[in-house]
Image: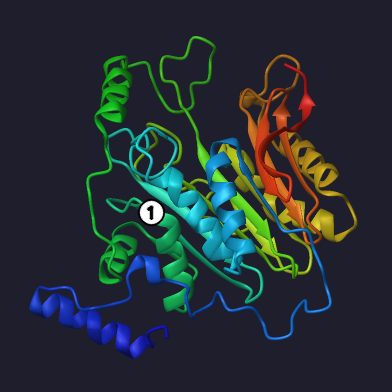
């Protein structure tokens, strides 16, 4: 059972006073009897095609999540297990362990999740030293009355909940940061987006969404954010309605790419709302991308009025229909259903 507010505060006080960590539920125990329980009777007459979709780097994770869903596990628990693979992979520099750091060489992570059956959500941002922020976001959802925790507060909460802090900066990411740092000069600043820009900002994330046979949906997004970012920068990933959004009556959607462009359009929320109005997932995602282009400031557009960045969206409807869409051609997304795990081409607005 989840801790009451009184129990949580008492245990936190005991931790501070005694200097040791009390026995709280371990990260792998989260969700076994908490918000992951479906609403009784919900969807009993509905039959969907179980489906998991994600960004392309989730190709291993979608299979893990799908197998767990087919085995009867809750969809949010399943997809968090899927994204944990990337969070704990030091070779994926877009998330978790080994994620690219901010301008000071510190890895700061963001994540958010939504659980369709219970209409609950959790989020963390700018959390340091914890490799699996997706699990911390779920802990916020399961064990607090809040939706988002940030910075030192998020880290303190995670440690109180049993997560073990560790150094997230791998040697590879440290070397990349040092190379970036060595190219800085007095003329570099954050709004410089000329072709000869000396500071290369990179983005990367994993989003995963799922629907069960009963039509229950969940979504999760986790990231290390924009590389070399200003410390404390918050992208779209931890923002409900931007980095991901889930409505158990309609579908789920999420995003990777330039978070600042996504935030201004509340794009994942918009995608789900367009599906609510009757658009198929692909059509909804393309409409969202059109909105992103329309709200992009001039300095980020090329001579043809096209964005200088890319942005990708992924969606699954309540019946199992799915899609991926990007600003530019060549993108792919991961999906797993009864046909197995695979990469499929994403729809796009512009041809490269």
Q: Can you say which quadrant of the picture contains the N terminus?
A: bottom left
Kindly give the residue lying farthest to the top in the view shown: 196
Task: Give the residue at mark 1.
Answer: 132
> Of 108 and 77, which appears nearest the observer?
77
Residue at the right extreme of this rendering: 278
Quarter of the view holding residue 219: bottom right
Residue displayed at 85% across by 43% down: 283
Residues 350 and 316: in front is 316
Q: Relative to residue 164, is residue 85 depicted above or below?
A: above
Q: Where's residue 295, x and y in %?
A: 71, 38
Residue 256 placed where, x, y %? 58, 40
Residue 200 occupies quadrant: top left
x 36%, y 66%: residue: 27
On the picture, is 54 further left or further right than 201? right
Q: Residues within 10 Å of mark 1 (few under 14, many from 20)?
A: many
Q: Position of residue 227 (x, y in %)?
A: 41, 32
Q: Is residue 327 visible?
A: yes
Whether 48 is drawn above or below 221: the answer is: below
Q: For the point 74% across and 85% down, which residue is it? A: 41
Q: Pick the residue in front: 328 or 126.
A: 328
* Quadrant holding the C terminus: top right
Q: Position of residue 66 (x, y in %)?
A: 62, 55
Report the residue at 47% width, 79% height from top: 145
Regarding residue 146, the answer to whether it shows in the image is: no
Residue 88: image quadrant is: top left
62 in relation to 25, above or below: above
Query: Dot 1: what SS?
Result: loop
């Amino acid at each position: 059972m989840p801790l009451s507010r009184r129990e949580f505060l008492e245990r936190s006080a005991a931790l501070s006073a005694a200097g040791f960590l009390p026995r709280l539920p371990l990260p792998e125990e989260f969700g076994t009897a908490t918000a992951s329980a479906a609403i009784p009777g919900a969807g009993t007459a509905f039959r969907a095609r179980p489906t998991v979709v994600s960004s392309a780097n989730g190709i291993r994770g979608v299979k893990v999540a799908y197998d767990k869903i087919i085995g009867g596990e809750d969809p949010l628990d399943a997809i968090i297990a899927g994204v944990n693979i990337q969070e704990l992979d030091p070779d994926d520099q877009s998330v978790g362990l080994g994620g690219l750091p901010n301008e000071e060489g510190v890895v700061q992570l963001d994540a958010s999740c939504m659980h369709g059956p219970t209409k609950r959500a959790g989020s963390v941002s700018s959390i340091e030293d914890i490799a699996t922020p997706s699990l911390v976001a779920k802990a916020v959802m399961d064990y607090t009355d809040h939706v988002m925790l940030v910075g030192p507060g998020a880290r303190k909460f995670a440690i109180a909940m049993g997560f073990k802090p560790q150094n997230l900066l791998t040697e590879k990411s440290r070397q990349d940061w040092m190379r970036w740092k060595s190219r800085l000069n007095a003329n570099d600043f954050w709004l410089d987006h000329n072709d000869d820009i000396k500071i290369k900002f990179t983005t990367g994330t994993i989003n995963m969404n799922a629907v069960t046979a009963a039509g229950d949906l969940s979504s999760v997004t986790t990231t290390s954010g924009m590389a070399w970012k200003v410390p404390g920068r918050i992208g779209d990933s931890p923002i409900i309605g931007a980095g991901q959004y889930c409505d158990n009556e309609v579908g789920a959607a999420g995003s990777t790419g330039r978070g600042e462009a996504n935030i201004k359009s509340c794009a994942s929320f918009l995608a789900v709302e367009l599906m609510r109005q009757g658009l198929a997932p692909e059509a909804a995602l393309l409409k969202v991308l059109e909105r992103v282009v329309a709200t992009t400031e001039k300095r980020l557009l090329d001579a043809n009025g096209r964005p200088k960045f890319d942005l990708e969206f992924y969606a699954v409807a309540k019946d199992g229909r799915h899609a991926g869409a990007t600003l530019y051609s060549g993108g792919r997304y991961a999906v797993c259903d009864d046909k197995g795990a695979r990469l499929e081409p994403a729809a796009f607005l512009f041809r490269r």
